Amino acid sequence: HPLDDFAHGLPKAELHIHIEGSLEPELIFALGQRNQIELPYPDVESLRAAYAFTNLQSFLDIYYAGASVLITEQDFFDMAWAYFLRAKADNVIHAELFFDPQTHTERGIGFDTVINGLTRACQQAREQLGIRAELIMCFLRHLSEEEAFETLEQAKPHLGKFIGIGLDSSEVGHPPEKFARVFAEARKLGLRVVAHAGEEGPPEYIWSALDVLKVERIDHGVQSLKDQKLVERLVKERIPLTVCPLSNIKLCVFPDLGQHNLKQMLDLGIVATVNSDDPAYFGGYMNQNFHQPRAALDLDREHLKQLAANSFEASFATPEEKRAYG
Ligand code: ES4
Ligand code: ZN
């Protein structure tokens, strides 16, 4: 479709990608072999066949298992580099990558190993691909506040290597307020702040992410349209939502793309962006997250232009970088 060529050609920023969710089954098996790690699946095909999710938790169980093959700094580099090559092919010129240090430190992998491998890939992406790449460290919300504080301590020697913090993993039952104090400390350190909210959880979690954690963007936020007052606030304050259409379908947040609320968001004036979330698990990188909703929701040229423009507005690029992006 000509509009898909148009969307493909637009320079874009990707703001919601879990780098561990870019680990393709082929790379999981290659790293498993390199590190002599037994996987509970005999081959790539049977692993891929297990990617049939019913909700967020059913996905997270497999996602954490996949990440168990990551051992060395080179493994983290290789994972991120494979993502940057895909991003380049989709005309992503700015990327803010989530990483989950606790998924690795819990298995005895050093915080330094994780962040140094990822940082080297980000540097190489700038130098060789012209992609401005930044890291955002996420706390796992199913773990305790104390464990989040320990992770922030481990991160302090690396403050120049990541621009902000986020909050991910199992949402329902783990409201933003649980992390009020650790987010306050991170803000004092000058870090940017985002959180997943309103993916499966209620609009109340979006309110508390804004009012208690004082986040600058909401990751997902698709439940916000249930709350008229919240919509008014998102529009008025230009609070961006990093929406992940294919993710929402794979995790059964919406029954199909034709029922996704992305187009409504744009028509209401919400600063919505499109992102891939965990592309190796959800069936597509950035451009697929433009093409499939474009077809299912009959998005027009203006919607697509707005999504690309929103991605830069919502990004943590500096004002100078934003000017350079046009
Ligand atoms: C995630 Cl889709 C999603 N939601 C919450 N946490 C996550 N971690 C990785 N993908
Ligand atoms: Zn996510």
Image (cartoon, rainbow, N blue to C red):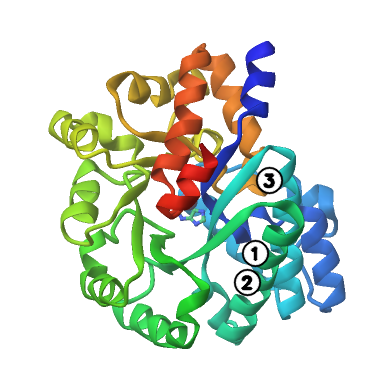
User: Badge 2, how many Cα within 10 Å: few under 14, some, many 20+?
Assistant: many
User: Badge 1, how many Cα within 10 Å: few under 14, some, many 20+?
Assistant: many
Label 1: element kind: helix
Q: Which residue is mark 3?
A: 87
Q: Disc 2 versus disc 3: distance between alpha carbons?
A: 16 Å
Q: Disc 1 versus disc 3: distance between alpha carbons?
A: 12 Å
Residues at circles 1 and 3 in contact by the CB criterion of under 8 Å: no
Q: Which residue is mark 1?
A: 122
Q: Position of residue 189 (x, y in %)?
A: 31, 77
Q: Disc 1 versus disc 2: distance between alpha carbons?
A: 5 Å
In the current view of this chain or complex, which residue is farthest to the left? 229
Q: Position of residue 111 (x, y in %)?
A: 56, 83
Ligand 1 lies under 8 Å from the Cβ of mark 2: no
Instruction: Give amino acid for label 3.
Output: Ala
Q: Viewed as shown, does residue 204 lie left or right of 36?
A: left
Residue placed at 68% from the left, 45% from the top? 87
Residue placed at 23% from the left, 30% from the top? 226
Ligand 2 lies under 8 Å from the Cβ of mark 1: no
Instruction: State which tag comes first along the sequence, 2 or 3.
Output: 3
Q: Nearer the viewer, residue 216 or 68?
A: 216
Q: Position of residue 322 (x, y in %)?
A: 46, 45
User: Badge 3, how many Cα within 10 Å: few under 14, some, many 20+?
Assistant: many
Residues at circles 1 and 2 in contact by the CB criterion of under 8 Å: yes
Q: Which residue is mark 2?
A: 119
Residues at circles 2 and 3 in contact by the CB criterion of under 8 Å: no
